[in-house]
Image (cartoon, rainbow, N blue to C red):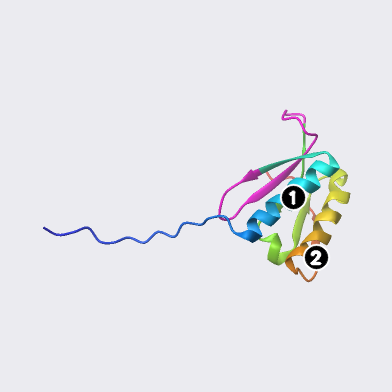
């Protein structure tokens, strides 16, 4: 009897860096009165919305991707998120050794 070939699958688990980024963004959003939604597990997208409650009136104001721990990019779609983005940028530089965090003013994604 022939056995099935062995297939290796790499499974991403939580890392200390990803947990630190999750916590950093959650704390900053709470402090500034924004809601944080997280999508993905290996490459996370952190969408930041105006207001704490979940409703369709809350606009997407900023987005951070997990790559921000190396590239330092923070996308801002609404000026209300600028103080939050500034705080996140400073934290990325301090906590993850990002040389220079960048706040990118952008149009809302389609």
Label 2 crowd bin: few (<14), some (14–19), many (20+), radius 10 Å: few
Where residue 50 appears, as percent x and y from the top left, is 80, 37
SS state under label 1: helix
Any part of residue 29 in sight:
yes
Q: Is residue 67 magenta?
A: no
Depth check, front residue: 97 or 73 = 97
Label 1 crowd bin: few (<14), some (14–19), many (20+), radius 10 Å: many
Residue at the image position 76 percent from the left and 63 percent from the top: 95
Asked if residue 57 is positioned above or below residue 92 in the image, the reply reads above
Residue range in magenta is 38-57
The residue tagged 1 is: 25
Residue at the image position 75 percent from the left and 63 percent from the top: 72
Residue at the image position 75 percent from the left and 30 percent from the top: 53
Q: Earlier in the sequence, mark 1 or mark 2?
A: 1
The residue tagged 2 is: 94
Rendering quarter of residue 3: bottom left
């Amino acid at each position: 009897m022939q056995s099935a070939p062995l297939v290796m699958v790499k499974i991403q688990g939580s890392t200390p860096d990803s947990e630190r980024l999750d916590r950093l963004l959650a704390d900053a959003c709470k402090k500034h009165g924004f809601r944080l939604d997280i999508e993905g597990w290996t490459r996370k997208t952190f969408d930041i919305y105006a207001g704490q409650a979940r409703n369709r009136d809350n606009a997407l104001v900023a987005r951070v991707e997990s790559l921000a721990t190396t590239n330092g990019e923070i996308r801002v779609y609404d000026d209300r998120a600028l103080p939050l983005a500034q705080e996140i940028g400073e934290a990325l530089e301090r906590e993850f050794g990002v040389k220079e965090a960048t706040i990118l003013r952008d149009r809302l994604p389609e």
